[in-house]
Amino acid sequence: MIRFVYLFVIFLFFTSLVLAQSTVRGKVQDKSSKETLPGAYVFITNTAGDTLSNTFTNERGRFEFSRPAENTIEISISFVGYEDLTKTLTDLSGRNLGTFELVEEGSLLETYEIEGQAIAGEMKGDTVSMNASAYQTRSQASAGELIRKMPGVVMQGGTIEVQGETVGRVLVDGEPFFGDDPAMALQNLPVDIIDRIEFLDQLSDQAQLTGFDDGETIKTINIITKKEKRGGKFGRMFAGYGTDDNYLVGGSVNFFSEAQRITALGLSNNINQQNFSADDLSGAFGGSDNRRGGGGRRGNPLTTRERPGITHTNAIGLNFTDKFDDERARLTGSYFFNESNNFLNRNSSREYILPSDSLQLYDEIRNSENNSQNHRLDLRLDYDMSEKHAIIWRPRVRYEKGTSFNLLSAQNLFNPTTPINETENTTSGSNESFRFLSDFTYRYQFDKEGRTLSAKFDTRMEDRSNESRLVSVNRDYQTGMRDSLIQNTLGSSSSFNYEFEVEYTEPIADHSQVRLEYELGNDLGNTLQEVSQREMESTLFELDSTLTNEFENTYLQHELGLGYRYNKNKIRIFSSFDYQVSILDSDRLFPGFENTKRTFRNFVPRMVFIYDPNENTNIRIYYRGDTDAPSVRQLQDVIDNSNPIQISTGNPNLDQEYEHRLYTRIRKMNPENNRSFFMYLGARMTSDYLGNATYIASRDTLLQGDVLLRQGGQLNRPENLDNYWDLRSYFSFGFPLNFMQSNLNLSARAGITNRPGLINNQTNYNRNIYMGPGIGISSNLGEHLDFNLSTRGNYNIVRSSLQENLDNNYYTQSTRLDLYWNFAGGFFVSTNVNNQWYQGLGEDFDQSVWLMNADLGYRFPPTEKFELKMTVFDLLNQNTSIDRNVTDVYIEDERTQVVQQFFMLTLTYNLKSFGGAGSAQGMGN
């Protein structure tokens, strides 16, 4: 293998000498402000008008393209809101074409907007750029309210979907804003400072530095602010008090001075608001905590998860951005503190999918209180130290501690009236964790354009500790016997992960480039759990060796890859072929030494094909193979009996998953008639899927010779299973309704998931087919009258291979209306109405639930700095939370306590002062 690497590098060297291919580059900026313009379209032709190349400026406003054979070329540059620039260049001897300055459209744009319909947006390669002025909102609206009006956008809780893909990051003028927390950014930027909204596929840090697009992207929203609003201060402070001692206090203040920007946030309330919003009370609607379905290792570590139940929150946040060293260095950072007190009251019922149409049920009532504090610090440094050297460094720190108290009452049943056994237990505990994460990327640019050497070094360090006490009283209805358990648990874990990657890129032809990559990664983990027990009548605790466990784990991975990139005119292709060797080495140190060691060898291919048939259409096809190792917790064969009738354990014999993923995306926009079309088709297939094996005891059974699993009790453990696959699709079509000055967005989604599971050693396949339409209408009437109406349905057909006759068809529909009317002077009314319709869940759950909130307010003239409003939450007094979870071995329905009706009086102060003291605009629009 080493000999092959040497031969390949020598081949690249001689190829480069023969071809002697290079690229030329340039920069695009605003002529008056000198601000760079990311996403500008650059089009290159020869004197005969033949297309030579096309590209877009990156986040720094820079572009590059392969040096053409012609001596004379014509370059055209266009950008939304600016006049097109066309230049003829006759001297291409240098590598740098210099800076191209665009002039803002001034009076011509204003006249067009008054006399005609504003252009909604346009396609720029992989980027959809939407014109904010084409979507009218109410006065004092936030960025989130603006984006919700745009085609293909769905916002629910803290999750934002754009054309079927989940948004992972929000930028402001190309700069990070509060780490990777989309909800926080959108709720705290006023709509009147926004010029455009860009939906883009942001490249990885390494791809941004090297210019080698490897197809790995994150769905990103980039908010482009108006040039005249980039200097000054703006924000909003609010305080409200209501019935039942409900309160809401908070605010945000932004200080913008071109490159230097500071944002401060604060929030305190007891009505479920957790992400700095005073206007959207939908968090009080309750709902699922989404604790199933994965995402732990791939989740967003910064976002405050919307918790079910009722939460009291105190939080502060700080975000800053600055540039120095002649703007070659950019420093951004954020600090976030959250203190929450969560109260959960939840009833749930499960029906297990057993062979031969047999039946077993599980009912649970859970009451808990969880108190937590967390600190999160994010920093990012982008530094172009010279023309050749550049770095990106992202250090992050997380610290969290908390306490919990949990009351659980649960039963296993043969049928709704015949219980098997039950448990009543109390668990109290505390936990503490510290994490440090660092991503460092370095790039060296050789004299020859396109030839780069880069290195990336990522580290993750984590320490966790916890302690808990369990007091349990259990009853067996078959024998009439009762027993009790008092158990103390001390746990600790530490992990260290590093990943080192070196990458070399080389141009090999006019439009082609290759990449040679080597990657070394290692996950090292150590966990310890000490469990001691005592009988109810005793005062002495004794170590339980069956439940006590000490475990060490390493997961070493080598990867060698060869990649190829092609970029010419309308076609971009990236493909890679990587060879991966993974070594899993696990040691159980207590009780008794046991070693598990396995080696996995896999080829991991990847391919991205992008085609732009015209400037308004973009087609992307993506495929990749990937592996995923089991977690340390999944590998530990230690028993968890915190719920004695639902016991779980790990599996040291787990293999890694191997996943195939394929998707196609088509996006088309017509700026002439403001019509847009988006389509997403995706498929995924996983071998050695990390699923679940459930064993339901037909009689009292001893586990590992000492732990009792009662008749009807369940033992759950992870297991590798095959035949997991899913297909999903999303369609969206948007166009204006000129007769009512509104925009209509039609959408539909459909899919099917085949999820395997083991139950009593028999394989069950739960197949879930889902489909549903979506309709959204948003007004463009102006700031005095604004409405948004949307509805989304979802019909589910669930079939089980073990019980083919089990009918689990159900339908849910979510409808929302937002209405604002400034009806006289400073007086306004607003309301948002949510309806959740459930059908097919059963007699106790089939219902239509309405949640209606209403405001009556007044903005004090002449500046409208102050706003006073009376809010009623849950006007119809119907708020409730219902949820259905479909897994591989059971179907579960849940009902969760939520915030009930209250009235609140709120005073808000709006701060808006732009352009410095001499040009402050006051506080109104």
Image (cartoon, helix red, strand yellow):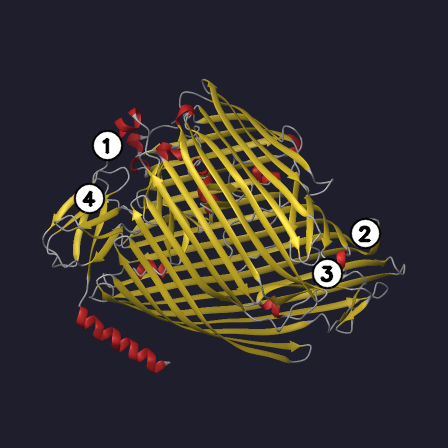
Q: Residues within 10 Å of mark 2 (few under 14, many from 20)?
A: some
Mark 3 in CB contact with mark 2 (< 8 angstroms):
no
Three-letter code, disc 1: Gly
- SS class of the residue under badge 2? strand
- 542 with respect to 724 (left or right): right
Q: Disc 2 designates what residue?
A: 415
Q: Nearer the viewer, mark 1 or mark 2?
A: 2
Question: Where residue 131 sits in the image (x, y, percent)?
Answer: 34, 37
The alpha-carbon separation of the residues under discs 1 and 2 comes to: 74 Å
Q: Disc 4 designates what residue?
A: 101
Three-letter code, disc 3: Ser
Q: Is residue 53 visible?
A: yes
Which residue lies at the image location 63% right of the left edge and 41% below the top edge? 811
Q: Nearer the viewer, mark 4 or mark 2?
A: 2
Q: Disc 3 designates what residue?
A: 642
- SS class of the residue under badge 4? strand
The alpha-carbon separation of the residues under discs 3 and 2 comes to: 24 Å
Three-letter code, disc 2: Asn
Q: Nearer the viewer, mark 3 or mark 1?
A: 1
- SS class of the residue under badge 1? helix
Give the camera-side residue of 830 and 745: 745
Q: Quadrant of residue 545?
A: bottom right
Q: How many marks?
A: 4
- SS class of the residue under badge 3? loop
Q: Residues within 10 Å of mark 4 (few under 14, many from 20)?
A: some
Give the camera-side residue of 385 and 670: 670
